[in-house]
Structure formats: C-alpha cells, structure tokens
Image (cartoon, grey):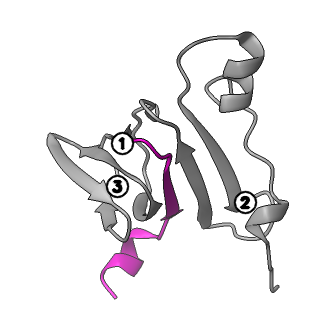
Amino acid sequence: MKYLVNVQEKQPDVDPRSLRARVKDREKAVLRDTYFLIDPDNVSKRLKMGYTVIYPTGTTTGHVHDEEEVYYVISGEGVMVVGDDEFPIKTGDALYVPPKEFHTTYQRGNIPLTVLWVTGKLDPEEYEK
C-alpha cells in the first residue's frame, strides 16, 4: 500500500497540553502541538512519523518507550535531554534516541521549536542484519 500525506492537511493531536487546549482553558503554560503523519491508524504497522511544535518557554512531556526514535530539527532551538545527557539543538540537527531511554525537549529562543520525529519497532533478530 502506498500512502501520501500533506502536513498542511493535518490537524494537531487533541491533547490537554496543546496550544489550543491551553488557550481555551486560559492557562498560562503553553507546551506543544503534535501532528501525526504516519502511524498504525493510517498505513504503517511499525512506523510512526510526525512533527511537534514547542512554543516559547514550552516543553514536551518526558517519556520512555520501547521503540528507537530519530529527531530532525526543522526550525528553532532548544535542549533535548536523553537519559542523563543534554544536547543543545538547532535548525538542521538530527538526534538518535535509543529504545527505552528517557527523553524530553525544551524550547529556547523566541520562535517555536519544530521537530520532525520518526519512531519504529523492529524484531530483535532484525537488529543484527
């Protein structure tokens, strides 16, 4: 099956931490909006791809998952925490996050930080190929 999606046609994930929810609830802390482009709900059973916009002074919720993940910074700058390490990130940077490693991202600067991310799960035998 082939699948094509245009980012301009996607709506952000409905999440209480999203910009829309924060504005609606008139809360001061704005964190992020996440857009899911490819995931098990539309085409791929193993891959997820999307992008997250983190607004000034915002952050993502730190989390851990079984899948490895890669990030590409489309615009902005910030800090990504992976395990015990902190990485300053900016437009054009790419970062790999191993499976089962805690990670979170903080926006720094005056423009939103936009990161493209891809995560996927392989069978353990496939790692050795």
Relative vertical location of residue 26 with respect to residue 124 in this rendering, above or below: above
Q: CA distance from mark 1 to mark 3?
A: 29 Å
Q: Is residue 19 visible?
A: yes
Q: Secondary structure at mark 2?
A: loop
Residue 5 in the image: state x and y as whole percent. Answer: 79, 73
Find residue 20 and report its image quarter. top right
User: Which residue sits furthest left?
Assistant: 84
What is the span of residues highlighted in magenta in the rendered image?
Answer: 109-129
Query: At 34% from the left edge and 88% from the top edge, which residue is drawn?
Result: 129
Q: Secondary structure at mark 1?
A: loop
Residue 111 in the image: state x and y as whole percent. Answer: 47, 46
Q: Which mark is drawn over residue 40?
A: 2
Residue 21 in the image: state x and y as whole percent. Answer: 72, 23
Relative vertical location of residue 101 with respect to residue 15 in this rendering, above or below: below
Q: Which residue is mark 1?
A: 109
Amino acid type at circle 3 is Pro
Amino acid type at circle 2 is Pro
Q: Is residue 72 left or right of residue 79?
A: right
Is 126 colored magenta in this rendering? yes
Q: CA distance from mark 1 to mark 2?
A: 34 Å
In the rendered image, which quarter contains the N terminus?
Answer: bottom right
Q: Which residue is mark 3?
A: 99
Query: At 32% from the left edge and 59% from the top edge, which residue is drawn?
Result: 90
Relative vertical location of residue 52 with respect to residue 71 in this rendering, above or below: above
